[in-house]
Each structure stands twice: as C-alpha cells, then as structure tokens.
Image (cartoon, helix red, strand yellow):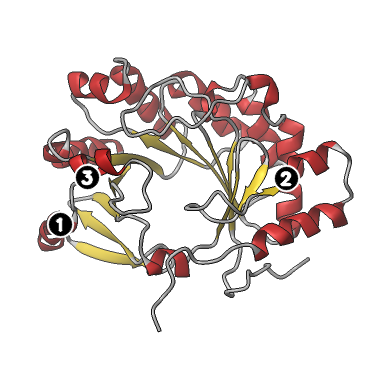
Amino acid sequence: MKDKVRDDYERPIISLRISITNRCNVNCIYCHHDGMLDSSSEMTPDEIYEICRIAKKLGVEKIRLSGGEPLVRPDIVEIVEKVNSLDFRDISITSNGIFLDKLAGPLKDAGLDRINVSLDTLDEETYKMIVGKNVLERVKKGIIESCAVGMYPVKINMVVMNNINNDEIMDMFEFTKKHGVILQLIEIIESESCDDNDFNSKYHYPLAEFEKHLAEIADEIKVREFMQDRKKYFIDGGEIEVVHPVDNTNFCKNCTRLRITPEGKIKPCLLRNDNLVNLIEFIREGASDEELIDIFLKGIHNREPFYKEEN
C-alpha cells in the first residue's frame, strides 16, 4: 500500500504510539495508574516489530514508544533496533528520564531519533513531592547526555500545576535554553470527560495569560497547523511550545495518530476505551498480513472525533 490510509473523516494515519508497558518506576501525582500488566504479559520485541511492520504497509511514518515508563523494559534497546530496521521517518520515546544517563547512547546507536522527557520542576523537594522519589539530578544528567549523543530534538514535557510549579516556568526555560532543549508546557485538561476532575480542578493552571506574556517577549512565533494550532515561541535562542488540553474540536480534526495499548489492542481514540480492537492475539496466532491489515483497518475505521465541530 503506497498511499496513506485515511479514516472515515479523511484524517490520514501518520503516526503510531505504542505503549510497550504500563509499569513505571515513579508514582506521579497526576497519573491514573491503570491496572498493571505483569511483565510476562507484555508484548515481545518481535510482536512490537510485527505491529510496526504492518503499520508501515499502511503508510505510517512515525513511531512513538511510551508507557508507563518504557525504559523499565530491559529489552528496550532491542525493541528500538527492531523498529529502526523498518526505516521509519521518525522514532521517538516518551520517558521520565531516570535511566537515560545510562541508556541515551545505546538508544541513539539503536536508531532512536528523539526523546521527550517528563520533568515538571527543577526543585528537589517539589520533584520528590510530584514523583515520589528524589532522582532529579539523575534525570538532568540523562537529559544532558541525550543532547550529547546527538538526539534531536530533546524535549522536556512540563505539566504546569497551580500552586505547585506554575512559578517555575521561566526557570525551566533557562535550563532548556542552556542545554539546547525544547520546553513543552502542558496544561492539565479540565473537563467533564476527565476521570480525575477533582485533582484537575484543584491544580489546573490556565496558560492563556502566560501565552500573552510569551507573545510579547518572543522574537518569533510559529504555528503548528496540524497539531492543534499549537504556538512555538522562540525567545533569546530558546524555544517554548504550549500544549493546551485536548478537549477541543481542533485537536480531533487534526488527529493523525493511532495508538496501541500495553495489552496489544488498537486504541482508535485517546479519550475512549469502548472501541478497542484486539490485535495481538491474531499476531500470536500467526495471522497473515492480509488479516492483520484488515484488523488495523477496522481500528482505523472505528476512529471518530471525540469533539466534533458544530454545524
């Protein structure tokens, strides 16, 4: 298949996000901690390869590996190597960064293009309160090592929380600017669809006013048209991108990502769990490429904008 497959709303499927584990080595206060899979039940490197191989046939260009914390898997380098052998345009990982000081080099050598590191504060006490342990210096070392081995871009995902770290944004920006890292500010979702509305209501920090400040001091502003019209602010040699909550029609209209759960199911929509399509059991039963493509297509045609534009 040469052309990209589109869903019933004419959205092309460009990227695939695979949660390769739901295990994690920290306990972040904003994480829902969905039921944990035993490591023996996780998809193997060969199974992840097969999923990516079929996705490639459907025109997928980019793979993101996530978790849980994907670097807790001892075979993470092998997984990246196998995915890289399929020649995707981009392979990335989202991580808490704790193991990056040791794994940045091997991951880069295996074919990893870039990494997003979740880091919400540079204050040791605040970090310990958010994640449950104090390994901040190790995470910072891992970020610097990722830059040193040539990953580009390295991004820091900073979840901005009211009365916790909302006053640290510019300190984080100075850190990212110093090391050539991009800062992504993430606004907590605040909507009726959220499973943890009490937490989100308490700690939600609207970034709209702060964006006005960024617009005033920016040397240049770019808009990512196919990413919610996110704005990228270039300031004094650094870069800040603002990620607003996904509960908006623009996010859904421009969504080009399909997801795979840690259990090996196709997840057509980030905000729904009632239309999953089992994929891994057919791979384990030796299904043909044609059968696996049909299963992928079923998941793709299950895609429907969670937030639709009003007529």
SS type, badge 1: helix
- What residue is disc 2 on? 51
Residue at the image point whose x is 76% and y is 55% from the top: 295
Q: Looking at numbered disc 1 in the image, what kind of residue is underneath it?
A: Leu
Q: Residue at x 67, y 67 (%)?
A: 4
Disc 3 to disc 1, how far (Cα)? Answer: 24 Å
Determine whether, in the image, residue 281 is placed left or right of residue 156: right
- On screen, residue 272 versus residue 211, left or right, reads right
Expressed as whole percent of the image width and height from the top left, the position of residue 11 reads: 57, 70
* Screen quadrant of the N terminus: bottom right
Q: Quadrant of the C terminus?
A: bottom left
Q: Examine the image and state in which quarter residue 202 appears.
A: top left
Residue that carries the numbered disc 1 in the rendered image: 214
Query: Which mark's residue is nearer the viewer, 3 or 1?
Result: 3
Numbered mark located on residue 85 in the image: none
User: Is residue 286 depicted above or below 135 in this figure?
Assistant: below
Which one is earlier in the sequence, the residue at label 2 or at label 1? Answer: 2
Q: Amino acid at mark 2?
A: Ile
Total residue callouts: 3
Task: Name the front one of labels 2 and 3.
Answer: 3
Density class for disc 1 (Cα within 10 Å; few <14, some 14-19, many ≥20) is some
State whether residue 86 appears in this view: no
- SS class, disc 2: helix
Label 2 or label 1, whichever lies nearer to me, is: 2
Which residue: 27% across, 26% down? 130
Q: Which residue is mark 3?
A: 201
Amino acid type, label 3:
Ser
